[in-house]
Amino acid sequence: MLGLKMATDPRWVNIAEKSIEEILIDHAFCEQKAATSGIALIVKFSEYPEIVDQVSPVVAEEWGHFRKVIKELKKRGFDLGKQRKDEYVNKLQTFIKKGGKREDQLVEQLLVCAMIEARSCERFRLLSLYVNDENLKEFYHEFMVSEAGHYRLFLDLAEKFANKNYVKLRWDAFLTFEAEMIQTLEYRGDRMH
């Protein structure tokens, strides 16, 4: 369904659960950044009612996710700690085409958002299937379902602002870039991406 060209090795879960505190902390910051990115999208492209109307609920949901992960951290006796750089997102943003019409810039931003949600969905799925902690299986299943919806929403929005064939071609290019990029990143069990 997601179309990712480079699947995460399911053994990533084994590495991740050895540092579950770090995964939860990174996850919390990913949710915070997703909410912030949604707000930035709304502010930057506020002249488009579809963006304001459809991204606002995503922002609220992402902030709710942040609060939910914070609650899980506290339940386990962990603190949020300091924010980390997200090398995955930073590298992904280098693939954004610069210039063009406002709609072109918007489509690029929507495709980046869709890609981040797709990869998050895939990782949450792995955690929901293979993590040993039964509570975390359910916890991550809920996030997986939500991220799948966000991924689809961002792709659908992109098709409202550009030709469907163009969006498909550009999305395929993002998928290829992301697959190649994943191979260059350090394989870490303490990061969601």
Image (cartoon, helix red, strand yellow):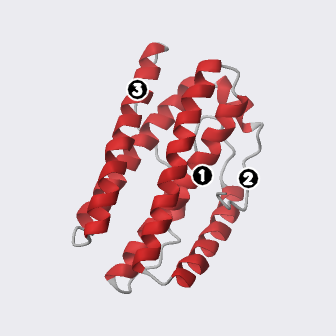
Q: Earlier in the sequence, mark 1 or mark 3?
A: 3
Tell me the residue that label 3 is attached to. Answer: 70
Sequence-wise, which precedes: disc 2 or disc 1? 2
Residue 166 location, quadrant? bottom right
Residue lying at 42% horizontally and 17% vertically, measured from the top left:
74
x, y percentage for residue 146? 50, 44
Q: Is residue 161 left or right of residue 165?
A: left
In the rendered image, the vertical position of residue 115 relative to residue 138, given as above or below:
below
At which x and y percent is residue 65?
41, 36
* Vertical placement of residue 69 versus 40, above or below: above
Would you name the residue on which mark 1 appears?
119
Is residue 93 visible in this depiction of the protein? no
Badge number at residue 54: none
Q: Secondary structure at mark 2?
A: loop
Measuring 32% from the left and 62% from the top, which residue is drawn there? 41
Q: Amino acid at mark 3?
A: Ile
Q: Residues within 10 Å of mark 3 (few under 14, many from 20)?
A: many
User: Which one is nearer the viewer's eye here, 53 or 133?
Assistant: 53
Residue at 38% from the left image edge and 76% from the top image edge: 105
Q: Is residue 42 visible?
A: yes
Q: CA distance from mark 1 to mark 3?
A: 21 Å
Amino acid under disc 2: Ala
Q: For mark 3, give the secondary structure.
A: helix
- Taking 32 as reference, is 154 left or right? right
N-terminal label among 2 and 3: 2
Classify mark 1: helix, strand or loop: helix
Disc 1: CA contacts within 10 A as few (<14), some (14-19) or many (>=20)? many
Residue 63, given in percent of the width and then of the height, sits at: 34, 39
Q: Residue furthest bottom?
A: 100
Measure how far apart labels 2 and 3 are at the Cα level. 28 Å
| Left or right of 186 in this view: 57 | left
Provide the residue designation for mark 2: 7
